[in-house]
Amino acid sequence: MGKLEEFEIILTPQPEGGFTVTVPELPDVTTEGDTREQAIDMAREAIESYLESVADLGYPVRRGIREHVTVCAS
């Protein structure tokens, strides 16, 4: 078993129902689920699959860089 890593996920509710999930630190990982719980489970599976795939191929993990900006919203 590998080391445990924690990743932030963003759940975006969809107008038709369900959630789209993105992983800011891993820009290549996106998934969805019909419920919040399913979306979180799908995110966990997508992250694990992505990390396994890049390790098997010998590629580096492509990690995003988080920044914050301030804007004036009307």
Image: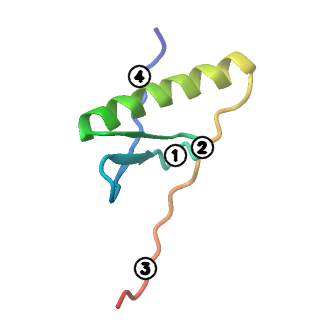
64 over 73 or under it: above or below: above
23 over 56 or under it: above or below: below
Which secondary structure lies at badge 4? loop
Cβ–Cβ below 8 Å for labels 2 and 1? yes
Cβ–Cβ below 8 Å for labels 3 and 4? no
Residue behind mark 4: 4
Is 5 displayed left or right of 50 in the figure?
left
Residue drawn at point x = 66 percent, y = 20 percent: 55
Residue drawn at point x = 70 percent, y = 31 percent: 60
Cα distance between the residues tagged 3 and 4: 33 Å
Where residue 5 sits: x, y (%)?
Answer: 43, 28
Cβ–Cβ below 8 Å for labels 1 and 3? no
Give the mark nearer the N terminus: 2 vs 4: 4
Quarter of the rendering containing residue 3? top left
Residue behind mark 2: 63
Where residue 29 sits: x, y (%)?
Answer: 54, 40
Give the mark nearer the N terminus: 3 vs 4: 4
- Name the kind of residue labelled 3 in the image: Thr
Q: How many residues crowd around disc 1 within 10 Å: few (fewer than 14), some, or many (20 or more)? A: some
Q: Nearer the viewer, residue 45 or 32?
A: 32
Give the mark nearer the N terminus: 2 vs 1: 1
Cα distance between the residues tagged 2 and 1: 5 Å
Residue behind mark 1: 25
Residue behind mark 3: 70
Cβ–Cβ below 8 Å for labels 2 and 4? no
